[in-house]
Image (spheres, rainbow, N blue to C red):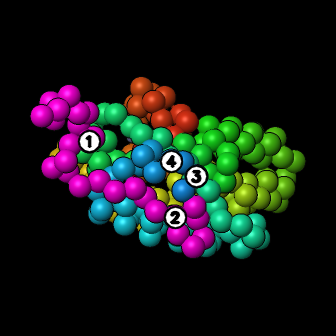
Amino acid sequence: MFSSALPERMDSSVIQVPVRSGSSFQVDSPPGSALVTPELAEELERILEQFAREVSGRRGHKIGVFFRPGIFGHHKVGRAADIYAVDGIGIDIWKRRWDEAQHRAALAAGGEEKRRVLNDERSRNLGWRIYKALQIYGRWSQPYRYPVQLFGPWTRSEGPWKCISDFLLDAHRDHIHVAK
Ligand SMILES: [Zn+2]
C-alpha cells in the first residue's frame, strides 16, 4: 500500500543485491551504497577481484573499494554503480596525484627519468589502475547512440569515450561510474 511512496531503487519488481567482498578486495561502504542487478554485481565482483589480485601483492591487505549510491539514469534500476574511493583514498585524490606525476614527468630532465616517473605512477596509482581494470576487463552497457557507460576523471585521456563533454567529465571528477 505504500508502494507509490517508495523510491524507484526500492521497487520490488527489480531484484537488487549488494556487491559482495571478494578474497582480495573488500567493500568498505555500507551494503546499500551499491544495490545493483545480480548481473552487475557479478561483473563488478569478477573485475574487482582480478584488479585487487594484481595490485595487492606488495600491500599485504585486502584492497578496499567504497561505493556511494547514485540517483539518475541506470542507477534507478540498479544497472549502475559509482566508485568513490580505492584503498581508503578518494578517486579525486588519486586523480590529483596522477596529474602531479604527469607534471613532474613533463619537467623531467631526460627521457629515461620521464619514463621512470610515469611507470612509478602507473604501478602505484590505484585510482588509475581500477579505472583501467574496469575498462579492460568490463563489459559495459552502450545504449544506441550513446557512449560506453564507463566514466571517470580519466575518460578523456584513457577512453573509451575520449571526446567526453566538459560537463560530463566535471560530473565524474570524484568517482567512476559504470553501467551494465
Ligand atoms: Zn553513476
User: Sequence-wise, which precedes: disc 1 or disc 3?
Assistant: 1
Callout in the foreground (2, 1): 1
> Magenta part of the protein: which range?
1-26
Amino acid of disc 1: Met
Q: Name the residue that disc number 1 marks.
A: 10
Nearest to the eye among marks 4 and 2: give it.
4
Query: Is label 1 in a helix, a strand or a loop?
Result: helix
Query: Looking at the image, which is closer to me, 117 or 132?
Result: 132
Residue 101 position in % (x across, y down): 75, 45
Residue 128 drawn above or below residue 9:
below
Which dot marks residue 21?
2
Earlier in the chain: of badge 1 and badge 4, it is 1
**Dot 2: within a 10 Å radius of its alpha carbon, few (fewer than 14), some, or many (20 or more) residues?**
some
Q: Position of residue 13 (x, y in %)?
A: 15, 49
- Is there a contact, CB below 8 Å, between mark 1 and mark 3? no
Residue pointed to by mark 3: 28
Main secondary structure type of the part rendered in magenta: loop
